[in-house]
Amino acid sequence: MRNSFVQQMLIEMERNPSIFLLTGDVGFNALEQIEQRFPDRFINVGIAEATLVGLAAGLALTGKKAVCYAIASFMSMRPYEQIRDDVCYHNLDVTLVGVGGGFNYGYQGVTHHTIEDIAILSALPNMVVVNPAYAWEAKEATKALMHSKGPAYLRLGKNTDYPWQRSTNQFLLGSGIVMREGRDIVLISTGNMLDTALMSAEKVEIETGLSVRVISMPTVKPLGVESIMESLSRGARGIFTLEEHGKFGGMGSSIATTLAEQSLIPDLFRMYTLPDRFVKSVGSREFLLAEVGLDAESLAKDMITYIQKKI
């Protein structure tokens, strides 16, 4: 996804001379094109994320659009006070880009696992939170954020090879994208769990005979409520959510709150998230997801068991 981000940033920085990109000494083998083409608007502040965000806020106060780029766990947590007080309080035009959300840096251990970023950043007033699923969504999200104003967080993960791209897809901030049609069950996924969602949906449909709709939800805040309500209006009996994030404060809990507020909790509702504990194993993203039961096989099995118990 980061290559799609970089290619779109080259287009946007060419178009808009007020865009600055700042990095916390990361982005090697990715950001060099930006540095070479726009050396006066590329700033490496070093491993100093608080300074990174503070400098971005200063640029924004002078009318610039500042984009901060760092590893997701460090982008969201180390400069949290600066994000809150310098950026969000003043509603400044600063976009935070967190690379490697979830378990994408699994080999580096717990310090690099990003399991709470969506929760803590969604809690901030004025903040938009975007979590694309694959390269096209990352490109379109970058374009949308570069054409909008205000604080935003873009979480980038690992691109996968699942064949999902369609010419009819349309990206809008605050809107879901239907990736697979179905009527009975709605599986809503955010971030790069979309391939797992699609594979699980196929298994569930074969085993239960229920049709499963899959929605990609790249914008977590503001939430794509319309696509959820539209699915319920079509007679959906259940909603499942899937994300590479902790249970509390993520997309699933936002959907549950939205449904509860409108008294629309369906007969079947289940959230699939990372467990409420630190995963201390070290390994690839795929290894860690399987360990916590977020691989396609484990998910489908649990969904099938849950459905069969409930209906």
Image: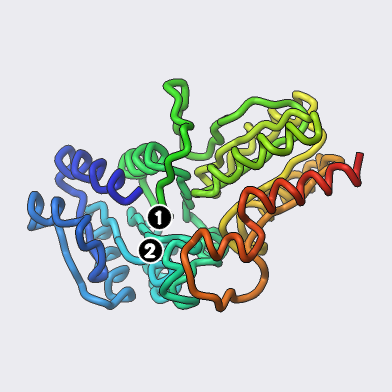
Residue at the spot of label 2: 87
Q: What's the residue at 44%, 61% (across, down)?
A: 104
Does residue 39 appear to the left or right of 274 in the view shown? left
Q: What's the residue at 36%, 66% (across, down)?
A: 71
Image coordinates for residue 229, horizontal then vertical, percent: 70, 32
Residue 307 can be seen, yes or no: yes
All told, the count of numbered labels is 2
Q: Quadrant of residue 23?
A: bottom left
Q: Crowding at label 2, few (<14), some or many (≥20) Cα neighbours within 10 Å?
A: many
Of residue 66 and residue 276, the one placed in the foreground of this image is 276
Of residue 136 and residue 69, the one placed in the foreground of this image is 136
Residue 38 to residue 290: above or below:
above
- Residue type at mark 2: give it: Val
- Label 2: element kind: helix
- Label 1: element kind: loop
Residue 261 can be seen, yes or no: no
Residue 59 to residue 301: above or below:
below
- Residue type at mark 1: give it: Pro
Q: CA distance from mark 2 to mark 1?
A: 7 Å
Q: Crowding at label 1, few (<14), some or many (≥20) Cα neighbours within 10 Å?
A: many
Of residue 173 and residue 3, the one placed in the foreground of this image is 3
Q: Quadrant of residue 198?
A: top right
Image coordinates for residue 231, horizontal then vertical, percent: 70, 29
**Rendered-image quadrant of the C terminus:** top right
**Label pair 2/1, CB-CB below 8 angstroms:** yes
Q: What's the residue at 56%, 35% (across, down)?
A: 176
Of residue 213 and residue 119, the one placed in the foreground of this image is 213
Q: Earlier in the sequence, mark 2 or mark 1?
A: 2
Kindly identify which numbered label has been placed on residue 151.
1
Q: What's the residue at 47%, 44% (across, down)?
A: 133
